Amino acid sequence: MSIETILKYKTIAVVGISDDPKRPSHFVARFLEDHGYNITPVNPKLTEWEGKKCYPDLTSIPVKIDIVDIFRRSEAIPPIVDEAITIKAKVVWMQEGIVNEEAAAKARAAGIEVVMDRCMKKEYVRYFTH
């Protein structure tokens, strides 16, 4: 599946979202929301983000999630991928600088598309703003 096709999915859980506007997880999520995506914030340390309820983990989210967009260190990825498999997400997207081949292989084996070491905002701009 191409990145362009993946970017057509509109329901995104942002794992590791920050309430600090200077953090990439905050401004990327804000950009995506401003461009028609439905953002579900995930961070056990926050109760809300930008007025939206923030969930402690993926399995607590009551709606179907298409893309799990991850802003966590590479070593924190495996349990997030396990949750993505549990909720039957379509895509696991690890942001720039995040690579975990073992977790990616596990996600792919479960039928989940994987994108690693790429920024959703930059890819959106590349494909949809000409």
Image (tube, rainbow, N blue to C red):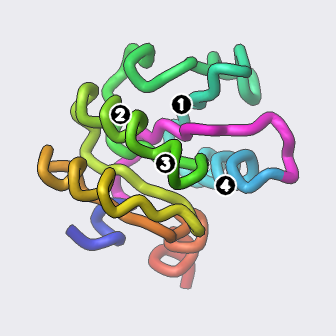
Q: Amino acid at mark 4?
A: Val
Under circle 3, the secondary element is: strand
Q: Marks 3 and 2, Cα distance to the nearest angstrom?
A: 10 Å
- What label sits on residue 40 in the rendered view? 1
Q: Position of residue 30 (x, y in %)?
A: 69, 47
Residue where numbered disc 2 is placed:
65
Q: Position of residue 76 (x, y in %)?
A: 52, 43
Under circle 1, the secondary element is: strand
In the rendered view, does 7 fall on the left or right side of 56? left
Is residue 13 found inside the magenta-colored segment of the image? yes
Of the residues under marks 3 and 4, which one precedes in the sequence?
Answer: 4
Other residues around mark 4 within 10 Å, as few (<14) / some (14–19) / many (≥20) = some
Under circle 4, the secondary element is: helix
Q: Amino acid at mark 2?
A: Ile
Of the residues under marks 2 and 4, which one precedes in the sequence?
Answer: 4
Circles 1 and 2 in contact, beta carbons < 8 Å: yes
Q: Position of residue 94 (x, y in %)?
A: 47, 57
Could you tell me which residue is drawn at 49 percent across and 22 percent down?
57
Is residue 89 found inside the magenta-colored segment of the image? no
Circles 3 and 4 in contact, beta carbons < 8 Å: yes
Front-most of residues 35 and 84: 84
Residue where numbered disc 4 is placed:
28
Q: Considering only vertical position in the picture, is 60 above or below 101? A: above
Q: Marks 2 and 4, Cα distance to the nearest angstrom?
A: 17 Å
Circles 1 and 4 in contact, beta carbons < 8 Å: no
Q: Amino acid at mark 1?
A: Thr
Quadrant in which residue 125 is drawn: bottom right
Residue where numbered disc 3 is placed:
69
In the rendered view, does 26 fall on the left or right side of 61? right
Other residues around mark 3 within 10 Å, as few (<14) / some (14–19) / many (≥20) = many
| Segment colored magenta | 7-22
